[in-house]
Image (tube, rainbow, N blue to C red):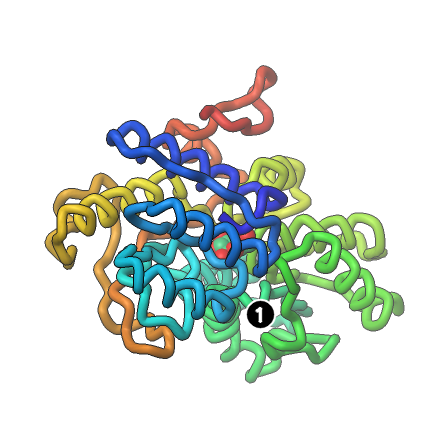
Amino acid sequence: MPTKSLERWNRDGDYLKAQFEAAGYQAQLKYSDNDSNQQNNDIQAMIADGVSVLIIAAIDGEALTQTLADAKDAGIPVIAYDRLIMNTDAVSYYVSFDNYTVGVLQGEFVKKAMDLDNAAGPFNIEFTAGDPADNNAGYFFNGAFDTLKPYIDSGKLVVPSGKTTFEQVATPNWSTDTALENMQNTLASYYSDGTVLDIALCSNDSTALGVAQAITSDYAGSNKPVVTGQDGDIANLRNIVDEIQTMTVYKNVSDEAGVTLEVAKALLEGKSPDASLLDSLSADAAYDTSSYDNGTGIIPSYLLVPWTVTKDNLQDLVDTGLYKWDANNQYLESAT
Ligand code: BGC
């Protein structure tokens, strides 16, 4: 896993380890501190240990080519977990969510929240995207931007900062602090004259945390801007209850771990899993053999289904069994 500093990877690691062990496997779990060199070393150590399969959520999708060539030489299959690993023919399968749809759900939420098809507008929006080293980040941004672009083109949505490309709004390491700082700068430069901020489109929860903090401390307007996110991290679910964040795109990473286990099992039994594996999965997923080319060819992908969470359907998270209400029935806590 990439890092312990972002909540979701702690959940991913716990679920993967628990589910593989429950299925009778021994599991080594390493976190590489968002440091690509360390991740290469961690994987090399696992190769040297003679592991049977590698499941990797890459820190930098472009930085594992040599190490994974060694895995291939050692006959160890590799599953790219959540993030596609680029420029290596050692990756057998990719297990993730439909990443483009994550962004579309954020864009659709904004469309509905602002009633863009009927309201006069114009509304002001700012974008915050993810880590350029993470292959997912562009999919999230494009999904949201493509959905909102017609309204930007028609003038119903305005971007006062003028920052409309992924490169201009990317956030290295998905860092909350960097997102906070960038939003503070944007607010100081483009909103200190009383310009109203209506929407802060953030690609995920770690960046939404920083952006919401900047809005709380540095935004003078009296409206509550719509703030989007992704993951359903506990701190963000709290902000949703407190109306500091408006929505998150939820991805059930326990299911993602479960699908990964089924793919790994099939590989270890010498099979080449395909669409027929879907029948044995307990989670909704699609088998995709056209979307994810890692530079060496298409990587067959199992893509799970993300969904939108707002203040109004938090109970649906509790119904997954992974969250519970706190003692005051106010905020959600982890139930696992
Ligand atoms: C994951 C997101 C996560 C982000 C930062 C992405 O690759 O798909 O769920 O928010 O990394 O950790």
Asked if residue 31 lies left or right of residue 239, the reply is: left
Residue 193 in sight here: yes
Question: Secondary structure beneath disc 1?
Answer: loop
Instruction: Give the camera-side residue of 97 and 237.
Output: 97
Instruction: Give the position of the C terminus as an image quadrant.
Output: top left
The answer to which image quadrant residue 329 occupies is top right
**x%, y% of residue 155?**
61, 81
**x%, y% of residue 16?**
38, 38
User: Label 1: how many residues lie within 10 Å, few (<14), some (14-19) or many (20+)?
Assistant: some
Task: Determine whether 312 is above or below 150 in the image.
Answer: above
Residue 230 in sight here: no
Residue at 41% over, 53% down: 56
**x%, y% of residue 188?**
86, 66
Asked if residue 159 lies left or right of residue 17, the reply is: right
Residue at 27% over, 45% down: 259
Task: Determine whether 334 is above or below 277 in the image.
Answer: above
Amino acid on which disc 1 is placed: Pro
Task: Determine whether 81 is above or below 17 in the image.
Answer: below
Residue at 28% over, 47% down: 52
Q: Which residue is mark 1?
A: 132
Asked if residue 277 lies left or right of residue 291, the reply is: left
Instruction: Give the camera-side residue of 122 and 330.
Output: 330
Outermost residue to the bottom: 153
Instruction: Give the camera-side residue of 314 and 206.
Output: 206
Outermost residue to the front: 48
**x%, y% of residue 298?**
28, 73
